[in-house]
Image: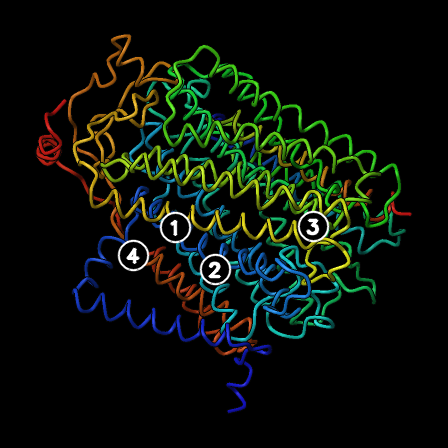
Amino acid sequence: MEFFDRFAVPHPSPLIYASMVAIALTLIAVVIGITYFKKWGYLWREWLTTVDHKRIGMMYIISALLMLFRGGVDGIMMRLQTAVPENSFLDAQHYNEVFTTHGIVMIIFMAMAFIIGMMNIVVPLQIGARDVAFPRLNAISFWLYFAGAMLFNVSFVIGGSPDAGWTNYFPLAGTDFSQSVGVNYYMWALQISGLGTLMTGINFIVTILKMRAPGMTLMKMPMFTWSALITNVIIVFAFPVLTIALLMGTLDRQFGTHFFASTNGGMDMLWANLFWVWGHPEVYILILPAFGIYSEVIATFSQRNLYGYKSMVGSMVLISFMSFLVWVHHFFTMGHGPLVNGIFSITTMAIAVPTGIKIFNWLLTMWKGKIRFTVPMLYSIGFIPLFTIGGVTGVMLAIASADYQYHNTMFLVAHFHNVIIPGVVFAMLAGLTYWWPKVFGFMLNERIGKWGFWFLSIGFCLAFFPMYITGLDGQARRMYTYSEETGFGPLNLLSFFGAGLMAIAFILIVFNIYYSFRNSPRNVGQDPWNARSLEWATHNPVPEYNFAVTPVVNSSEAFWDSKKNGHNLFPDKFEKIHMPNNSGVPVIMAGFFFIFGFSFVFSIWIGVILAALGIFGCMAYRTFENDHGRYISVEEIKETEKKYGGAK
Amino acid sequence: MKELFPAKQVMGFVSSLLLTVVALCVYFLDMSFEVGMTILLVTAFIQAALQLVFFMHAGESSDKKAIYTNVYYGIAIALVTVFGTLLTLIWGYM
């Protein structure tokens, strides 16, 4: 029994036991369901082994929605706990675990997955490619992300969740203060999914640089593709820092080194430093694709071309470099002198300038445009004022001397939710609604979608604006309860009420998917939104080869040109199409990675060694594998095109 | 015959051997920590540049511009990170 003792949750509560039962029941139900409907073969052939960028994108987005649910429940538990003074719904330890996992799940496993999912679905279509440059690598990226996410999520029923905050500062995260395996989970879950993200970065840079349709120069790429390129460049330069920091943290915790210890020549501040060297560019990794989506949506629904294309590109390039120059603003109060704080204060304020340029560009795109208030456009219009408030409070936080007042208060919590929710979450929901017909061939219901938008926006304002006030009044973040005399009670109750509205919005959005799946008409045609960029020049839903004929373009709005200016997008004839084969290696390899990570968390070395052998075995298999892909014949293409209604 | 002889690569190979010898001197000769570290850093960066240009053929394809932009960008970010960290944690720490 001694062996199994380590898997016990060190700090159990009825909630955790209930989750254990729920997880077990769900797993059993899923397995029985798939077996009963005889879907194992279908699942394996069509999804687990797929290398198709559209399907991988869909799997990313489904995972992201699941993680949004999980992170959202965490968020509501926190709001419930702090809704009234001296509440005892969660105890201090449980509350620590909840805010830690809320942060990681939302940033790494929800927002990142959503963004990479969007890029997967849209970027190859926007540049007229058949797939990404390395389809097999793309599948590995997804499955590594998935393995990391699952590893992180088993932590709260096996062994205990990390509880040192999503920033995981040492020495608190060291073995002296965090004895349970929680922080080990943090290290390995992030490490594994981070590897996947890094591969995605390389994959998409190559895809965008090498696989654009003839005629599409860099300055003729649609804006979302530009934002994806810049994002992936930041990924490739920022994620290695995280990889190394996590490795050093693992060595500290499991092998007795002293990188982040305060004794024996170690430096505990180095973790915070390295974490934010990655962490600040990460913020821009999240926001730039969102900016790209807004650019597409606002141009489409204002029926105007994007104002200031070159300045948009220029400001993104500037942001990509400047995002590496501001990281110290996350720990102004750590004790460095006025010179250091002054430098990083100024760089932080400077980075607001290119962001401001983009806001003005969107406003000027809408100026005198014929605006249609569809769901994606509502999210984009809602984003502009809300995000600007978040940006302005960010500049307030950038003033180092004033930051001593705001630091670690609810003011900061309000600020970053105010940039991330209207910035990233709104953008993802806008993109989801906008590109939904592209992927599934039917539209999401506009009425329910608009209800969802209003619930989310109003809920957001009610949930987070009160935190600005309580923060300025001195409510510290991560405090699991407070006394009645502080006077924080009423505003926190309001905040809980707002969180409830946001939960209703989430239910509406999920219900909308179900409702539209049942009721929406399936003949939406090729261009339901009267859109502008190249991805709309093929059928809905997109055939596996994307474009029957490689398109030839001469502007960033190739599809608009072909509709309005008589540009011939497809001058060539049908030719046989070279496609990659499916492969089971990525999902098997990610399985080994999961075992590797899990064994490492508990220091079960035999499991680590066996899983490592499995991982290298998969690599060796791939090295000697002979796979030249397959061809889709001209007849087959013609037949598919006929099914979509008329060959071009 | 002259076109077939890879003069550039041979030169690169000889230079990288030379740099290795210089770097080895740090171990065998008696010098202060600062001098040794400087020699190691300088030779390491020249060595990396040599490998990139002569043996990984960085400047020989149509992607020359993208490759060099990437390299310079990477160097800039590495310098900012290293010196920024030194500034934050050591030089500017009160």
Look at mark 2 in the image and give the residue it sits on: A148
Q: Which mark is residue A48?
A: 4
Relative vertical location of residue B9 with respect to residue B34 in this rendering, above or below: above
As measured in the structure, the alpha-carbon distance from the residue carrying label 1 to the one carrying label 4 is: 28 Å
Residue located at (39% from left, 31% from top): A376
Q: What chain letter is assigned to the residue under label 2?
A: A
As measured in the structure, the alpha-carbon distance from the residue carrying label 1 to the one carrying label 2 is: 26 Å
Q: Earlier in the sequence, mark 3 or mark 4?
A: 4
Q: Amino acid at mark 3?
A: Leu
Tell me whether the residue at label 2 lies in contact with that at label 3, contact meaning CB atoms closer than 8 angstroms. Answer: no
Q: Amino acid at mark 1?
A: Ile
Q: Earlier in the sequence, mark 1 or mark 2?
A: 2
Label 4: element kind:
helix
Label 2: element kind:
helix
As measured in the structure, the alpha-carbon distance from the residue carrying label 2 to the one carrying label 4 is: 16 Å
Q: Amino acid at mark 4?
A: Leu
Tell me whether the residue at label 1 lies in contact with that at label 2, contact meaning CB atoms closer than 8 angstroms. Answer: no
In depth, the one of A570 and A341 nearer the eye is A341
As measured in the structure, the alpha-carbon distance from the residue carrying label 1 to the one carrying label 3 is: 38 Å
Look at mark 1 in the image and give the residue it sits on: A507
In depth, the one of B36 and A31 nearer the eye is A31
